[in-house]
Structures are given as C-alpha cells and as structure tokens.
Amino acid sequence: MSKHTTSIDNTLVQAGRPQPLQTRQVNLPIELGSTVVFDSIEAFEQARDHRYQTGVQYYGRYGNTASFELELMLATLEHAAGVTLTSSGVAAISLTLLALLKPGDHVLVADHVYGNTRAFCDTVLSRMNVTVEYFDPMIGTAIESLFRPETILIMFEAPGSGTFEFPDITGITEVARHAGVWSVLDGTWATPVFCQPLDLGVDVLVYSASKYISGHSDCMMGVIASGDANMHERLRRYVMAIGDKTGAQEVYLALRGLRTLKMRIQAAQASGLEMAQWLAEQPQVKRLLHPALPDCPGHEFWKRDCTGSAGLFGVIFHPCDNEQLREFVNALEHFGIGVSWGGYESLVLPVTPVRTAKSWDEPGKLVRFNIGFEDTDSLKADLLEALPLLNSSN
Ligand SMILES: Cc1ncc(COP(=O)(O)O)c(C=O)c1O
C-alpha cells in the first residue's frame, strides 16, 4: 500500500500544515493582516487578477495562508472543486441563496430547515420578490410535482436539526438535476466523516463549522462547498463582493478542531446512540427521533447515504404541561440549556416545530439533546432524577 494513500484520517492530520513537515512548528500561526505588499507592480497585478482563487494572497479580506489551507483541506474532505469560508453557518446559507436567486424566482425549501434559514427565506427572500414554497421533507422524488418553470433551487437539510427527518438526498438531487434545478443542502449534522453530499448529487453543500468542525463551542464559521468549479467561483465572487469574511482566530480554531474531528464525532456517535437507546426505554418517552434508529422518518435514507450518526437527536415525551417540561429541563444538571450543538458538552433544548407545508401533529413534547463527552452513567443518573417530573405512559 502506498504511504501516500489518501484517507480522511491522513487528511485530517496532514492537510493545512506548514510544508515540508520537518523542522517547523506543527501548526500554522494565527495569521493577522490586511495589506499584502508586492515586489513589483507586475506581481501586484498578477495577484489582483487572480484574487478570487484560493491560494492567491492579494488582500486580507480574500484570505491568507491559513484560511486557504483550511479551504483546501475542507475541499479534499468534501470531494469539492472548491470551498469558501464565511463568518457563520447562517452567512454560508444566506449568501448562497442570495448568489443564486433573483426577483421572480421560485425556491423550494424543506419544511424542517433550521429556524434561521426559514427566517431568512421569509424576510429577505420574500422582500426580494422570490416566491418561497415549503415542502414536506419526506416528499422524495415527488418533489418533481412542485417544479414550476421559474423554480431555480431546492434548499434542504439532512437531517432537519430540530425534528430529524432524513430526506431522500439522491432521489431529490436526481429529479432536480434532470429538471435543471439546483440543490443546496445544509449538511452540518453528518460532517464529512459520515457523509459526502456532493457525491450524492448535491450542487452546493453549506454548513455551520461552529458545530463539530471546530468542535469546542468557541468558534463561529460557515462553509460553502461545490463540486463544480464554475459554481464554486460564482459563489466565491459573491461572498467576496459582499465582504463576508472569517476571522484569523476562528481559522486557527477550525484547523485545530479538525485534527480531532473523526475521534470526536465517533465518540459523539457512540454516546449519542447509547443515550438514545436508553432514553427509548424510559416510561416518559414516547418516541426517539434519531436518524440511526428505525423509528425516525428517513432512517432508510440515512442508512443508504451516511456511514455514521452525530450525537444530536430528538425525544418525544408523552404529553404533559409546559410547566412540567420546564421543571424537567431546569432539573438537569449535566445538560446546559442552549442553542447550537456539536461541542464537547451536553445540551438540552425544548423544540416547537414550525411547519407550514404539512402540520406537525405528533402529540407530546419534543426535546432536543446534544450528547457531549461527559460519562454516560452521569448523564443517565441526571435524567433518572429529572424524568419523574414528566408523565409516563402508564
Ligand atoms: C443545521 C444548522 N445549520 C446552520 C446553523 C447556523 O450556523 P451558525 O450558528 O454557525 O450561524 C445551525 C445552528 O446554529 C444549524 O443547526
């Protein structure tokens, strides 16, 4: 076997480091800077004319050695023609949609998308006179029936980060490509360790690197990746034109986080599954929404398209009062109450699904758990004390 065999493991360790690897500090430094100076006007003009390319130093806003290394590493992991970093996951989503849509267009958006994606569509896109139509995330290839002559794009998420339905990625991208409609997927949950959406036909992959990629709840960043060089350049030029940019410290933290991504997400997978299966047996629990468990809508698509699962999942508890739910959440000691996920710490969050395509009629209370790296015995003991505050099935 060649010692240069490419694997996710080797890319995570070796990419984005000073070359050659000998007699250097292991990591690239935090690289601050705005102005870049050149030896000659010819060198300046050469950089100016190629400033949208990853690797060309022209001015701080276009990137520097460390941000280019991070983009190249992510492009390798995602099997992308190119990657552009943004200041947050929301920026990656909104700038991609803004770059591809114009007044008069029709966009199909999965009903389970992240709350801010919906807010962006309902405020910014609708004000731009883009028609936003929400669809049932489990629609599959029948999405074709929603296509109009002015349909430009499908925006979806795998799985929905509040309700966890896992859509038929390949079915949707196949009919979309056939009709000349772009597909944009928020793939934050699975990370490149467990899924390569661009290989499944997705045109643009967007995600929040604030979650597992950086992995320590200390960094905000977004990623836009495309398998097509023209699409990549179009989106990159748009991001640069708007002037969005990720900070030097965040680039450092994301590069550092990536070194341990595979181990962290495998640990999150193991603890997440253990906790989900344990919770499923508790009398207060009605149903688990975890893509790796058979009860979750789209489990069969998760099985087909992913090689693993993250530590974020939903639990539907038997119907109870809002006050009971609040007491339960307040009683937990190991679970922080907060948004976001993918860090090292466990979190809990009651979720009220917003649905406009198909009503959410599941009786009971939905609570989202992010399982961190605490020992699972302590997490179970914490839950065992709080669960009696909720109603049981009998
Ligand atoms: C699925 C998903 N996409 C995007 C985002 C937004 O990312 P960021 O917080 O980095 O803007 C979040 C959470 O915040 C999310 O859960």
Image (spheres, rainbow, N blue to C red):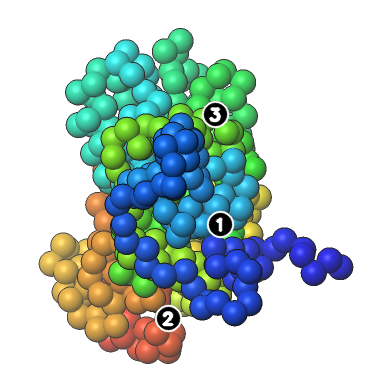
Q: Secondary structure at mark 1?
A: helix
Position of the N terminus, as image quadrant, is: bottom right
Q: Is residue 382 above or below residue 126?
A: below
Spatial CA span between label 3 and label 1: 19 Å
Q: Is residue 157 above or below residue 312?
A: above
**Amino acid type for the residue under numbered disc 3:** Asn
Frontmost residue, 256 versus 273: 256
Q: Is residue 280 visible?
A: no
Q: What residue did someone put label 2 on?
A: 373
**Amino acid type for the residue under numbered disc 2:** Phe
Q: Is residue 110 left or right of residue 364?
A: right
**Amino acid type for the residue under numbered disc 1:** Met
Spatial CA span between label 2 and label 3: 41 Å
Residue at image coords 77%, 63%: 5
Query: Dot 2: few (<14), some (14–19), or many (≥20) neighbours within 10 Å?
Result: some
Q: Which mark is residue 230?
A: 3
Q: Position of residue 377 (x, y in %)?
A: 42, 89
Image label count: 3
Q: Is residue 246 visible?
A: yes
Q: Earlier in the sequence, mark 2 or mark 3?
A: 3
Q: Earlier in the sequence, mark 3 or mark 1?
A: 1
Frontmost residue, 119 versus 203: 203
Q: What residue did someone put label 1 on?
A: 73
